[in-house]
Amino acid sequence: MHHHSPSGLALPAPSRRSLLRGVGGAALLGAGIPLLSACGGSGTAADPKTVSLGSNASDAVPKKAFAEIYAAFTKQSGIKVDVNTKDHNTFQEQINSYLQGTPDDVFTWFAGYRMQFFAAKGLATPIDDVWQKIGGNFPEAMQKLSKGEDGKYYFVPLYTYPWAVFYRKSVFQEKGYEVPTKWDDFVALCKRMQKDGLVPIAFGDKDAWPALGTFDQINFRANGYDFHVELMAGKASWTDAKVRKVFDLWTEILPFHQEGAVGRTWQDAAQTLVSKKAGMYLLGSFVGQQFTNKADLDDLDFFPFPEIDPAYGQDTVEAPTDGFMLSKAPKNKAGAVKLLEYLGTPEAEEIYLKSDPNVVAASTKADTSAYTPLQKKAYEMISGAKNLTQFMDRDSRPDFTSTVMQPSLQNFVRNPKNVDSILSSIERQKKTIFASS
Amino acid sequence: MTATPAKAPEPATTPTPGPAPTPETGKVSQGHRRLLTRRDRLTLGLMAGLPTLLHVALVWLTALASIALAFTTWNGIGFDSIQWVGLDNFRELFTNNPQFWPAVEHNVVWFVVLILLPTPFGLFLAVQLDKRIRFSRVYQTAFFLPVVMSMAVIGFVWQLVYNPDTGLINSLIGANKPGHYIDWIGDPDLNLWAILIAASWRHAGYMMILYLAGLKSVDPALREASALDGANEWQTFKNVIFPTLRPTNTVVLVVTIIEALRAFDLVFVFNKGAQGTELLSILVTNNIIGESSRIGYGSAIAVVLLVISLAVIIPYLIATFKKERRA
């Protein structure tokens, strides 16, 4: 029931996968429960042979995949993992009070600003000792993502997935389109698609977060990664000419977006790509969930968002990363460290990826031979990236993105002419929000 | 009518022995003249005390805490991070929040629409059903059904009706093609009205039941008398029936105001309060619940909502009670 997710805060993580996979995976759930009960529930929390773990993997498929990882860990180390699974959105909403109360030893979370925020507030324990063992498994960009503001490690990444422009190979072949690498080619392609009776860019912003993704892409292509980070951290101004340029570029391609976007869910927008009514769709690779027919899924391909400024090329990839953190006062720290070390191994990632073909392993050491062509491409794109971003609502303050950016961008999508008043309003609200602790 | 206030104290004493059955029948007759027995007092104390305690703790204390928090900024992490900011939240709200004034406006529009359209329609339905027409029960059930359903379910159902691509309306009128698009859910000029149709659909049934109950208590002799005086149906209704429905009208007005102010679930499910459908309750939720945790700021919005509610309800209730006392 993605419609009920209380805010766009829900990140492009399992919650969005719930709809179709929930149906498909319902049958698998039966297998997941005995596994979970087999590895949890016995012994108290202080038991040196048990590590407690708070999980947001409430959907059937990821839940089962995680359970398999923990089972493999128990087999290897003899330490039991007591899993406490909460509904994905609820977990995210309650994270503040959860971490302040008596959290589990290890908990699932996302890389990015919010992770660093918890680290800075002392709600997580640094895990440099874990990284001494697992550091070699990860590329530099992943290592950077896993550190707090103090330079210490706080996070063990498990999997990641890219945002890119998705399209149907057959449509491009049939109409003789070529993958655009430069902005002007991209605009020209949009025009051509419109002439051919296609919706050039599918778009649904009812959930208010997809537009954040479009902004991210244009911003780091036009202004570079460093400016993007400054802007997300509330340091750069939203009334800066650089930001205005992003919105001018966006206004240029907005007429090629699907009409009535604010009333459409991303799932409905994805359906227009499935039915070949739309030519392209800028989204995370979870768009693949909407391709339930195997032949359609094989026809799905993507290209990185085109270059805007040659100084930055296509060097930045938006790749939200999910993984694990260690809570502030773990009851069984030794066991938790062992678990985190295991979660940072390629084996743990391979177990997870077997059941989730829309994501790729965070580690460069994981076996890629079983990857689909799409996964291989995603993997190459991410591992070749100079910079990785996490998505606006993970890279900035969640109060700012949910209460200011989401409504503002919905407003812009509807009224691109109001851009100046929208931007000055964003800047005024940003100042107040970032001034508070 | 005159008897109501005088009667009030009596029922308060009579039910007391009920839940605590006193087997000594002899004492009951004395109890009327003498003070209550110790057991009665204990029961009474518990029965009045516990709810009062819960009420104070869960309603008054939380409301006061919320008012206090409205003058602070707090991210919900540790009590030491609460900072006093005076009126900053309100200043920010009134001058900088692009969603605040539209939200106030929409709450007002919500009330005006509910009182002008579904309420008279509910009264109309009630009058028709009161005529003992055939299948009255069936109609009553049909109109009342939306009231029984959860608002979230109603929102979900209507969202399917309004879905711009696959919804019932756009499919029927062919407005789901590029160029002809009608975005019922996203277009700020349309979406509030689209939701209000759903809200009215439910509200009419609610009002119908309230009025039907009111009409049942109208003395048939009044109708007879006005019929004898030669009044036609409309005159009877306007001059005789409607004035006797005054207590019901009070309830209807208060209920409608409350419905307008607490409007939330329907919109939240429909489009999460996107532009065009902002409501105060949704702003409160978006700011407090979830990761955003702008608890002070959200509380300030909640206080505005509280002040509006009080400003509307208190004068009306005072006026009503005054009139009743005079009568």
Image (tube, rainbow, N blue to C red):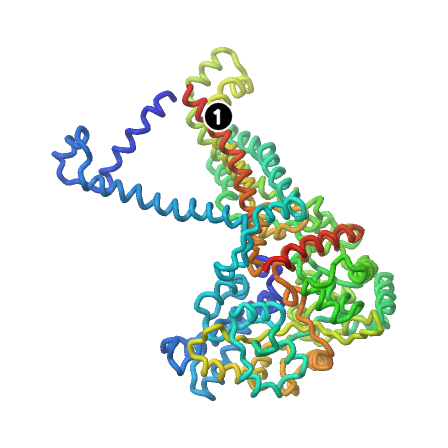
Percent from the top left, x then y, of residue B151?
53, 48
Nearest the camera: B63 or A428? A428
Report the number of numbered marks. Answer: 1
With B135 as the anchor, is A322 left or right in this view? right
Q: Amino acid at mark 1?
A: Ala
Q: Looking at the image, is A122 positioned above or below residue A211?
A: below
Give the residue drawn at x 63%, y 87%: A365
Nearest the camera: A362 or A32? A362
Per the image, the residue denoted by label 1 is: B319
Give the residue drawn at x 51%, y 23%: B242
Q: Which quarter of the image is occupied by the C terminus of chain B?
A: top left
Percent from the top left, x then y, of residue A273?
73, 66
Q: Residues within 10 Å of mark 1 (few under 14, many from 20)?
A: few
- Quadrant location of residue A152? bottom right
Q: Looking at the image, is B255 positioned above or below residue A91?
A: above
With B215 as the anchor, is A408 left or right in this view? right
Give the residue drawn at x 41%, y 22%: B325
Give the residue drawn at x 55%, y 74%: A62
Percent from the top left, x then y, of residue B289?
54, 56
Residue A199 showing in the rendered view? no
Chain of the residue under the numbered disc 1 shown in the image: B
Q: Which quarter of the image is occupied by the N terminus of chain B?
A: top left
Outermost residue toward the top? B229
Q: Determine the secondary structure under disc 1.
A: helix
Percent from the top left, x then y, of residue B135?
48, 35
Q: Looking at the image, is A231 positioned above or below residue B30?
A: below
Nearest the camera: A371 or B314? B314
Nearest the camera: A117 or A182? A117
Residue A277 showing in the rendered view? yes
Q: Looking at the image, is B191 positioned above or below residue A151?
A: above
